[in-house]
Image (cartoon, rainbow, N blue to C red):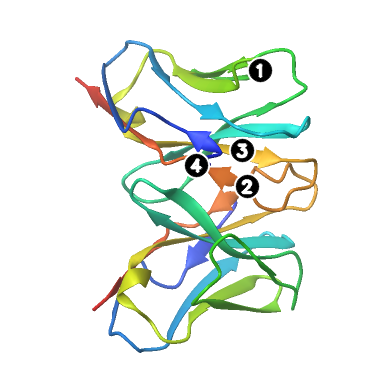
Amino acid sequence: DVKVTQSSRYLVKRTGEKVFLECVQDMDHENMFWYRQDPGLGLRLIYFSYDVKMKEKGDIPEGYSVSREKKERFSLILESASTNQTSMYLCAHRPRDRDPGTQYFGPGTRLLVL
Amino acid sequence: AQKITQTQPGMFVQEKEAVTLDCTYDTSDQSYGLFWYKQPSSGEMIFLIYQGSYDEQNATEGRYSLNFQKARKSANLVISASQLGDSAMYFCAMREGNYGQNFVFGPGTRLSVLP
């Protein structure tokens, strides 16, 4: 069974705090993704990584950074959280040999920035 | 311009009836893929069905089928014999090109199945 875990289901932070969202997959997949989901906007890609230490910007990278030191772990970092980063954050991964659209998602982290 | 349009923010359907969720897309690529994902209240996104732009037959997966009309650029999801567990958000998505690492999601349709 494919397993993706995200470090927290719910998180409340204050403006200006540094926030780490962790994603771990147990399938040895190369490709990992971070999305944010907002009502009426669907999912928007923040960053993705196709291998260890590799990262590429998605559609909305501003205000975020990522870290991929190990294959199974892909971290999303908010250097200085702002209220407009209140959102649902979803991590996903896929194996190299599957269609790019067939992704396995984690349960999501609901982040509230006060 | 929106790449994926889902015009129905919400839909209701009676249990055991069929329902169609609309999706239109915009691309100039010849090779692309269309996907539907389901998101229950638990938050996890679940892959449902895939249609490649060169596939001549409509994709089917159990009670799900994708009504692909290439000339009209539409990829509607049909759920037959709705069940209460089908109540969820449904997202249409598109992957452009052969090796696109990212792809675009629509805004979603919330389906509610009534007993």
Query: Which chain is indicated by disc 2?
Result: B
Q: Is residue A1 visible?
A: no
Is B25 above or below relative to B115?
below
Q: Which residue corresponds to mark 4?
A: B46
Q: Which residue corresponds to mark 1?
A: B70
Q: Amino acid at mark 2?
A: Phe
Earlier-in-chain disc, 2 versus 3: 3
Q: Quadrant of residue B94?
A: top right
Labels 2 and 3 positioned on one and the same chain: yes
Q: Which mark is residue B78?
A: none
- Give residue A93's position: percent from left, percent from top: 63, 57
Earlier-in-chain disc, 2 versus 1: 1
Q: Which residue corresponds to mark 3?
A: B94
Labels 4 and 3 positioned on one and the same chain: yes
CB within 8 Å, label 4 to label 3: no
Marks 2/1: CA distance? 19 Å
Q: Which residue corresponds to mark 2?
A: B103
CB within 8 Å, label 1 to label 3: no
Q: Amino acid at mark 3?
A: Met
Earlier-in-chain disc, 4 versus 1: 4
Question: Residue at (66%, 52%) from the top-left corner?
Answer: B102
Is A63 above or below relative to B10?
below
Spot the residue most to the left.
B115
